[in-house]
Image (spheres, coloured by chain):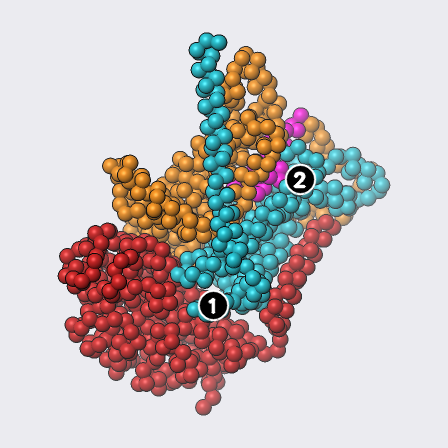
Amino acid sequence: MARGAEHRAWDGLDGRPSRRGESAATPARRRPWLSRDGEVNLGDLVFRQVTALFAAGTVLTLAAMAIQMTRASALSLERFGLRFLVGRDWDPVRELFGALPFIYGTLVSSLLALLIAVPVSLGVAIYLAELAPLWIRRSLGFVIELLAAIPSVVYGLWGIFVLAPWLRGTVEPALQRALGFLPLFRGTPRGVGMLAGGVILAIMILPTIASVSRDVMRAVPNSLREGALALGATRWETVRAAVLPQARSGIVGAIILGLGRALGETMAVTMVIGNRAEISASLFAPSYTMASVIANEYTEASGDLYLAALSELGLILFGVTLALNLIARLLVWRVGRLPGGAGRL
Amino acid sequence: MRSIVMLAAAVALAAGCKDKAESVSGRGAESTGEVEIQGAGATFPYPLYSKWIAEYQKLDPQVRINYQSIGSGGGIRQIIERTVDFGASDAPMTEAELGKAPAKLLHIPMTLGAVAITYNLPGVTDRLQLSPEIVAGIFLGELKTWNAPPIVAMNPQAKLPASAITVVHRSDGSGTTAVFTEYLSRVSAAWKGKVGAGKSVKFPLGLGAKGNEGVAGQVKTTPGTIGYVELAYAKQTGLAYAALRNRAGAVVAPTLENVAAAAASEVASMPADLRLSIVDAPGKSAYPISAFTYILIYEDQMDTRKGKAIARFLWWATHDGQRLGPSLDYAPLPAQVLPKVEAGLRRLQSKAKPLLSS
Amino acid sequence: MNSRGSRRRLKDLLARGTCVAFTLLAVVPLASVLLYLGAKGVSGLSWSFFTELPRPVGESGGGMANAFGGTLFLVGLACAVGIPVGVLSGVYLAEFGGRGRFASVVRFSADVMSGVPSIAVGIFVYTLVVLSMRRFSALAGGIALGILMVPTIMRTTEELLKLVPDSLREAGLALGLPKWRVILRVVLRTGASGIATGIMLAVARVAGETAPLLFTAFNNRFWSARLDRPMGSLPVQVYTYAVSPYAEWHQQAWAAALVLVGMVLVLNVLARLLTWSRGGSR
């Protein structure tokens, strides 16, 4: 279970299906405490209340965050209302603030990341869950998880000095030669920009999607695999016909978890995306994400409205990631409830 | 029990690293009389400030000044919030900003610097010469390639490539941006109408980078870029920078002399609160994008010891410290300004007593 | 074998090959990051790198003692916040909460909290702690990191305690111990190594966090072990140096990143070994 905990986006998650792994035993085993002669111990009472208080802390923190961020963005909410979401100007001189370029940059960089990361991580997940021998399963699984352990700022450093020059010198000119007729690949190859942001994010969310998908695939009952194999299906056909359909909603959940992480990722993206509030069709053009603009401007925004607008970006980010996590967890949880899975998560 | 043990372990860990690092720096952090001062703001003078702080610590080891270069916008915002003991900005605070401060703030000019137009053009060895129209044209996105006719006309001898120009600007609230955009607003009506002047403006195009450090870093790593940074950043990192045609029609490079000339032609009009812009100065050899950079500090200091330490440091920096400027490409404060600076510093007080004696 | 059968086998082979290829591809970035860290970082490591404070811009030499001390201090603080809250909440969920509504709300909040972007936590702590104390402080940084640690620790603790057999609890009670002492002395002790794993992973994660520190602990080029002052940290220092124009700072950024990644990887490997040594099949 510890393996899941390396990763914030899904660490709470692996708990659920693993409980499920013992689902037959669990509810029965969780008997109420046997009390001695029904007598109530004062120490017990206090202890229970204290732990409950700490447990309430998380709920309160979450609520306080929502309240605090709404309060901080009140001025902007009031002034711009829903126009904030569609405004294209981010102009502190004229005190005009619109979030669209940041929303666009956040969504496009994250979708780009999904586009790259989803096929790769599904390949990894299928290999690790269905094909690899046990020792590879363990060691390679661990290596993939280490990918999630590298701090964001280190990816950013690598992005500036390794990835961006490579994109500028090799990948972007090649894309331009091959696909330059598409508006996606027009413009000057600079290295830093939307493409670099998307690639960095893809690397960062890959372990999330791969590990959670692998876990949901392992949760698919073995009887299904055995049935397919007995009918003469190849390994791949077994995966396609027996495992993937069962795991589908869990995999979608894994992808949404990855998306949630990509949307909120800050440092690495800030270091390579070019930090410019602009909506451009080209992947070579610089862009800006909600998290990046907060990182860059939050300590220095000197106008009240400016600060409120930044806080509102934070609020949107908070709300969106909250909703995505909710959906993802429900989806993964559903697979987790399939009876008789092959592996505990 | 277990969690208590762990908590104890965590505390021990913290304490352990405290001991370690203190023995490293050679003295206890809280030995008697030590003052730690927090400052934040402009990146423009950071190379000089960090030098001053290191030198001043040798003179008075009790005073430790932590200056973080987060940008002038940050300096102004954080001094208004009172999260730092002093702020720093290249752009004087606006009336609106001063109005938000909870008490009276002083502007103390510390040094003079130049905003250099820096570029990365492999193969172009001679210094580019640019007119105000060209600079505005590039930053407005009207001149898109390095071999655009106006640039070629001013630099006939340079082998300018046909590649696209990539503009690099600041992504944070920046005094350097304020000085640069004020200059552009003075020399270009189109800029004034479309973009305007300020610490954070909506640039029509380009890459955003954080701090003078970030812009210089971006220009250095990306061919075909042009950006604006404090001169020291361009010189220390070996970046090329352009000479500009000034108001008098001469083409001048950003040098100490030309910055001093810009200041000399404007200081007579320095107001009592010391806020003065010297962009597009009229002098014959004046470099047109020059600026004073300021420390922002509350006139009335709540903590007397801290206040005294800051006042002494500022006095030292504006006097003896000035000789460190030229080696880092900052021009010393003009002699005419010094009496006004001294008068400003003498107004610093705590609990109704002046912080500087005599 | 007919052609249909061989086509199916070819397809199987292709699909399997693709999966293997993708797995190898996924390892490439990790390998590249580690290689570059090694190539560019090792040369920057020296005794003075660990023991000296940063020098002024343009002077060569100097180190990051402030950032090393700062990161250890901040992580210690985060543990002081995160471990008691996380472990005790986990105890509540496992021992008292059961399937009750309140416990479900807590579990749900923890899951959601683990997905909240760390920069949002930074804003939250800034408005709550920094503005009310009127200063950037190590305390604010420690709280921000501590908040990020809680969900991981809470859920690990809960899961681990649920694995502790009820017979142990009953044995404790039979000895006449009150419930709370049974939990502290028997149940938690049995689950300790697992909980330690969770804590290590939580530490590994927050040790590399940058975004929430930018407006809480801020940065400090000096070292001081005070809660009410700004404090430097490795991730913030890596960020500052990485985006700077100075070659020497770049080198220091690589060296610091190498140390940071080393720390994080060691914690991860330790945690993994601990899990394996418990004999888990996971």
Chain B appears what colour?
Answer: red
Q: Amino acid at mark 1?
A: Ser
Q: Amino acid at mark 2?
A: Thr
Disc assigned to residue B35: none
Query: As drawn, is B136 to the left or to the right of C254?
Result: left
The magenta stretch spans which residues?
Answer: A1-24
Q: Position of residue C193 (x, y in %)?
A: 70, 44
Give the distance between the C-alpha atoms of the residues marked 2 and 1, in whole angstroms: 45 Å
Reading the image, the residue beneath label 2 is C275
Label 2 crowd bin: few (<14), some (14–19), many (20+), radius 10 Å = many
Q: Chain of mark 1?
A: C
Query: As drawn, is A111 to the left or to the right of B277?
Result: right
**In the displayed image of the protein, which residue is found farthest to the right?**
C175
Chain A appears what colour?
Answer: orange
Residue C236 visible, this angle:
no
Q: Which chain is cyan?
A: C
Residue A120 higher or lower than B141, as above or below: above
Residue A160 higher or lower than C133, as above or below: above
Reading the image, the residue beneath label 1 is C60
Closer to the camera: disc 2 or disc 1? 1
Task: Give whichever of C26, C176 is nearer the camera.
Answer: C26
Q: Is residue A18 magenta?
A: yes
Residue shown at 70% from the left, 35% from the top: C279
Label 1 crowd bin: few (<14), some (14–19), many (20+), radius 10 Å = few
Residue shown at 47% from the left, 48% from the top: A155
